[in-house]
Amino acid sequence: MNKLLVLAVDAKEHIRQLKAAGLQNLEIVTAREAGTVADMAAVCNIMLGDPPLIREVLDSAKCLQWVQSSWAGVDNLCRPELRKDYILTGLKDVFGPLISEYVMTYLFALERRVFDMRTNQSKRCWQPLSYRLSKDIGVGIIGLGSIGQELARTVGHFGIKVTGLNRSGQSCDGVEKVFTVDAMAEFLAEPDYVVITLPETPRTSDFINADVFRMMKPSAVLINVGRGGVINEKDLIEALQTGAIGGAVLDVFNTEPLTDDSPLWTMSNVHITPHNAAVSFPEDVVKIFAQNYRRFVRREPLLHVIDFDRGY
C-alpha cells in the first residue's frame, strides 16, 4: 500500500479529486491518522503539493520515493543544500494556455490604450487614441519550454511576429527565428514586448539585468511570467526610472508579496499582479498525478521528471 501526503493550500479539493480518480492501493494520510505534519510525512512514500510546503517536511520524510509538484516552479525543492534522493515530477502542458491568456490580455490592453482610455473616461474626455496593427508588433520570448511554445502559438495566431531565445538555438513551431544567448543583442533589437518564461535556476538568477535592458528598445515592455529571481530588480527599477525601457508587466518578484516600499508600486508604466497569471487547478494537478501514479505502480518511468541540477 502506497501512502500519500497532500500538502497544498487547497488540499481538500486535491483530496476530493484524488478520491474520485479511483487510484488503487493508495492511502491518503490525513491529520486524523497522524499527529503533526512531520509525523505524517514520516510514514508517506509519496507527496503531492506546493513546493514551499513540501520543503518544510523533507527532512522528516524518511520513506519518501516520489514528489509530484502542484506548481510549475520547483526551485524551492532544487536548492543545492536539499536532499535529492527521490523522484521529483513537475507539471507540463497545464500552464501554457493560462500564461498565454495573461500575456495577451496585457499586450492588447496596452496596444489598444485601454488604461489611457479609462483615464480619459474618468475625466469625461472624448479623445480617440491611435494603435498599431498586429502585424506591426513584435514579441520576443525568453525561454521556449512548454509554456513558451504555447505562448508562441497563441501570439502567432494574431499575426504578431514571434522570435525566441533559448540555450540551444533549436527552432520550434510558431517562432520565426530562435536565437542563442550569444546573440542576445540581436534578439532584443526588435521586439516590442519581451516575455520571460524562464524557471529560476543557478543559471538564470539575475539573467535579466542592466546589460539586457540596454539592449532592448527604449519603447519595449518587459513581461515576466517566469520567476522573480530571473530579473535583477534593482536594475529593472533603474531601467524603468531612466526610460531605458518603456514599461513592465510583472506577475512575479524577488520577494513575495512585493514589499510596501518598492518603487514598482507607484510607477505609471508598471502593471503588477500577485503571482496569479497561471494558478494550479486541482483537477489539472490530479490528472497528471494519476497518470504518474499508474506508472509508479507499474514501475514505469514517470512523466515530467525534474533534473535537480538544472531546476526543470
Image (tube, helix red, strand yellow):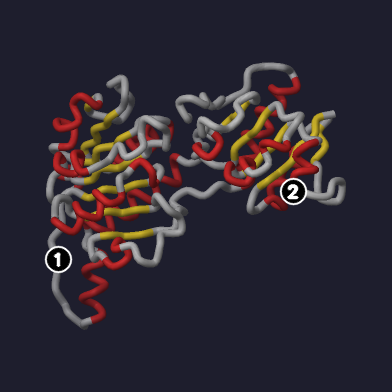
- Residue at the (53%, 27%) spot, across then down: 306
Mark 2 sits on what residue?
16
Q: Position of residue 275 (x, y in %)?
A: 45, 53
Residue 120 seen in render:
yes
| N-terminal label among 2 and 1 | 2
Residue 178 seen in render:
no
Q: Nearer the viewer, residue 269 or 60?
A: 60
Bin the neighbour count of mark 2 within 10 Å (Cα to Cα): few under 14, some 14-19, many 20 and up: few
Quadrant for residue 126, please give it: bottom left
Pick the quarter of the image with the N terminus: top right
Q: Nearer the viewer, residue 103 or 204?
A: 204
Q: Position of residue 305 (x, y in %)?
A: 56, 25
At label 1, which amino acid type do we have? Leu
- Residue at the (24%, 33%) spot, across then down: 163
Q: Which mark is residue 205?
A: none
Query: Is 132 situated above or below 69?
Result: below
In the image: residue 34, left or right of residue 93? right
Mark 1 sits on what residue?
129
Query: Is 11 situated above or below 68?
Result: below
- Residue at the (73%, 37%) spot, across then down: 60
